[in-house]
Amino acid sequence: GQSLEQPSEVTAVEGAIVQINCTYQTSGFYGLSWYQQHDGGAPTFLSYNALDGLEETGRFSSFLSRSDSYGYLLLQELQMKDSASYFCAIPDQTGANNLFFGTGTRLTVIP
Amino acid sequence: EPEVTQTPSHQVTQMGQEVILRCVPISNHLYFYWYRQILGQKVEFLVSFYNNEISEKSEIFDDQFSVERPDGSNFTLKIRSTKLEDSAMYFCASRPGTSGDTQYFGPGTRLTVL
């Protein structure tokens, strides 16, 4: 089976940096994705790591360590609009790459 | 930028009734998915569809569920006899099908079963 663990809640101050961790267990690993979801909205793709290391996209970066079965999402220069839930997800072993989602981390950005 | 669309945005139905949720995936995508999210919980995979047939389905996707791609653009999820526990957000997603690509989600349909 597969499992993903994330902290349930994180609070950070506007302008600060926050890191959201994700540890995973799976029999076959193809990569780690991150999605953002605002209340009542759809999951929106943020990043995908298939190889170890850091991927940077603007204020958001994502890191993967396959040997540790661990990744994180790093959000810099936090803005109020970053308040949302953040899910890590892994595709399964089938050709369809069905996504298995973590339980999500609710980020609250405060002034 | 092309996007996945879903209709209706909100569907209210009585327990035992049939509902059809509709999705229009991004036009050149090859893989289509349905996911659901019960309020306050994580997103759960239901079914994937490729080359006009089901590719994979989860334990949630039992005999009351079915999917169809009736024409070249629409992708539907039918729930035959709705139950209270079917109340959730249902998201459609699509993916181009190339290696390492990602899934793009529609805005969702909120299904409320009374």
Image (spheres, helix red, strand yellow):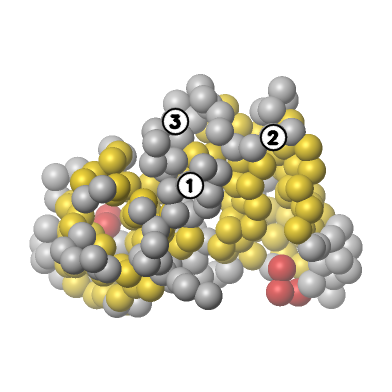
Q: Secondary structure at mark 3?
A: loop
Which of the 4 image quarters holds residue B57? Answer: top left
Disc on the earlier residue, 2 or 3: 2
Q: Which three-letter amino acid code belongs to the residue tagged 2?
A: Leu
> Residue at position x 64%, y 57% from top?
A46
The residue beneath circle 2 is: A51
Q: Residues within 10 Å of mark 2 (few under 14, many from 20)?
A: some
Please state which of the two labelled residues, at mark 1 or mark 2, is closer to the viewer.
1
Is A33 placed above or below A17 here? above
Location of mark 3 (residue): A93
Q: Position of residue B79 (x, y in %)?
A: 17, 58
Q: Position of residue B31 (x, y in %)?
A: 36, 51
Q: Mark 2 vs mark 3: same chain?
A: yes
Which of B12 and B105 lies nearest the eye of the viewer?
A: B105
Q: CA distance from mark 2 to mark 3?
A: 17 Å
Tell which tag, 3 or 1, sits nearer the viewer: 1
**What number is the disc on residue B98?**
1
Answer whether residue A2 is visible to the viewer in this image. Answer: yes
Q: Residues within 10 Å of mark 3 (few under 14, many from 20)?
A: some
- The answer to which quarter of the image holds residue A102 is top right
Q: Secondary structure at mark 1?
A: loop
Badge 1, how many Cα within 10 Å: few under 14, some, many 20+?
Answer: few
Q: Is residue A44 above or below residue B12?
A: above
Mark 1: which amino acid? Answer: Thr
Q: Is residue A27 left or right of residue B77?
A: right
User: Which residue is painted at 21% across and 50% down in the image?
Assistant: B52
Label of residue A58 in the image: none
